Image (cartoon, rainbow, N blue to C red):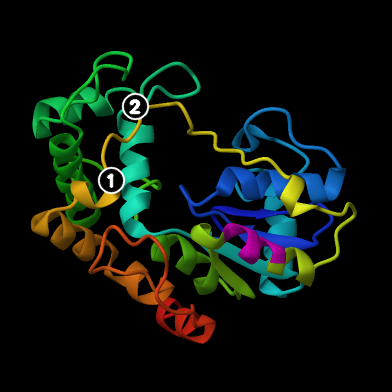
């Protein structure tokens, strides 16, 4: 299996396990900058050099040697499951992607037909019942994760604990897991723990939100999208995420964590 979703600086100063929809564009650009003193021109997910990525064949050897030998500081970043699944819906389902097309080709027409989901018309700009459509999308997301139908779960809405666990299963160990909601503090802890060819001033780093503007703006507070049934579905899908990363299941309106992440607990439970 190796180390899918794992990025590493070319200087091997640090290793990062990407979790989709958890500030990965900004983190990737910070890693790139820390090696090269400049940002990657464009979306960091498109970079084929300047940063080791498991998806690039030439990077797999260096990543494997480093992670199995636990040679470098390793970290990842997580996000509240309620806001993460909402963000996936507006970006991936309602939004037009950076190639000018819908995400995964015929996925949206399939969802419109099978689940009655609306996405704001051809360009995602027209008004529609966001709450009703999101709740139908939740049913679809649950079906993909629970029964792998009508398709396998997508990385943008599959559980964070699943992403985080592959790194542990294959011999990796995290030194830090921090929250998107407390990004500056968590990322600063990482930067303080490593030595990089170029110093990073976190306060001066722009936020690289590559999904910004892809889809319609969220028209309601987070908690309005989740009724009792929706909360039940979210818990069914993301129970482990809430427990391990200390988020508040009871209150969708509270995006902040309610406890400290216990790295020993994460390694024990996700290494099973």
Q: Which residue is mark 1?
A: 221
Please name the residue shown 16% across and 35% down the image.
133
Please name the residue shown 78% across and 69% down the image.
192
Q: Which residue is mark 2?
A: 216
The magenta span reads: 183-188
Residue 50 within the magenta-colored segment of the rendering: no
Gap in Å between the C-alphas at discs 2 and 1? 14 Å
Please name the residue shown 31% across and 69% down the image.
248
Picture coordinates of residue 52, whole percent (x, y): 72, 49
Q: Is residue 222 above or below residue 49?
A: below
Figure quadrant of residue 91: top left
Q: Is residue 87 above or below residue 11?
A: above
Q: In the picture, which quadrant includes the C terminus?
A: bottom left
**Numbered disc total:** 2
Magenta region, mostly helix, strand or loop?
helix
- In the rendered structure, which disc, 2 or 1, sits on the residue that comes first in sequence? 2
Picture coordinates of residue 148, whole percent (x, y): 22, 50
Mark 2: few/some/many CA within 10 Å (<14, 14-19, 20+)? many
Label 1 SS: loop
- The one nearer the camera, 190 or 115, is 190
Picture coordinates of residue 36, whole percent (x, y): 86, 43
Q: Is residue 224 above or below residue 103?
A: below
- Foreground disc of the pair 2, 1: 1
* Residue 148 visible within the image: no
Picture coordinates of residue 125, whole percent (x, y): 31, 17
Check contact, mark 2 vs mark 1: CB within 8 A. Answer: no
Label 2 SS: loop
Please name the residue shown 36% across and 68% down the image.
241
Residue 178 shown left or right of residue 137 in the figure = right
Residue 16 shown left or right of residue 215 in the figure = right
């Amino acid at each position: 299996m190796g180390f899918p979703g794992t990025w590493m600086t070319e200087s091997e100063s640090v290793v990062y396990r990407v979790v989709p929809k958890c500030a990965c564009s900004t983190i990737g650009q910070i890693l790139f900058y820390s090696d090269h003193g400049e940002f990657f021109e464009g979306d960091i997910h498109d970079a084929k050099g300047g940063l080791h990525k498991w998806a690039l064949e030439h990077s797999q050897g260096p990543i494997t040697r480093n992670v199995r030998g636990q040679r470098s500081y390793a970290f990842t970043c997580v996000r509240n499951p309620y806001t993460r699944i909402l963000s996936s819906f507006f970006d991936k389902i309602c939004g037009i992607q950076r190639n000018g097309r819908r995400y995964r080709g015929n996925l949206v027409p399939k969802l419109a037909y099978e689940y009655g989901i609306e996405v704001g018309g051809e360009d995602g700009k027209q008004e529609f019942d966001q709450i009703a459509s999101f709740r139908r999308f939740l049913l679809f997301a649950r079906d993909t994760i629970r029964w792998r139908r009508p398709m396998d779960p997508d990385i943008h809405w599959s559980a964070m604990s699943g992403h985080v666990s592959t790194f542990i299963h294959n011999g990796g160990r995290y030194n830090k897991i921090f929250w998107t909601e407390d990004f500056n503090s968590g990322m600063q802890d990482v930067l303080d723990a490593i030595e990089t060819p170029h110093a990073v001033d976190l306060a001066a780093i722009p936020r690289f939100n590559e999904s910004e503007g892809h889809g319609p703006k969220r028209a309601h507070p987070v908690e309005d999208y989740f009724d009792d049934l929706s909360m039940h579905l979210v818990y069914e899908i993301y129970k482990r995420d809430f427990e391990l990363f200390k988020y508040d299941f009871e209150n969708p309106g509270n995006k902040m964590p309610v406890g400290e992440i216990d790295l020993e607990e994460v390694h024990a439970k996700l290494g099973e």
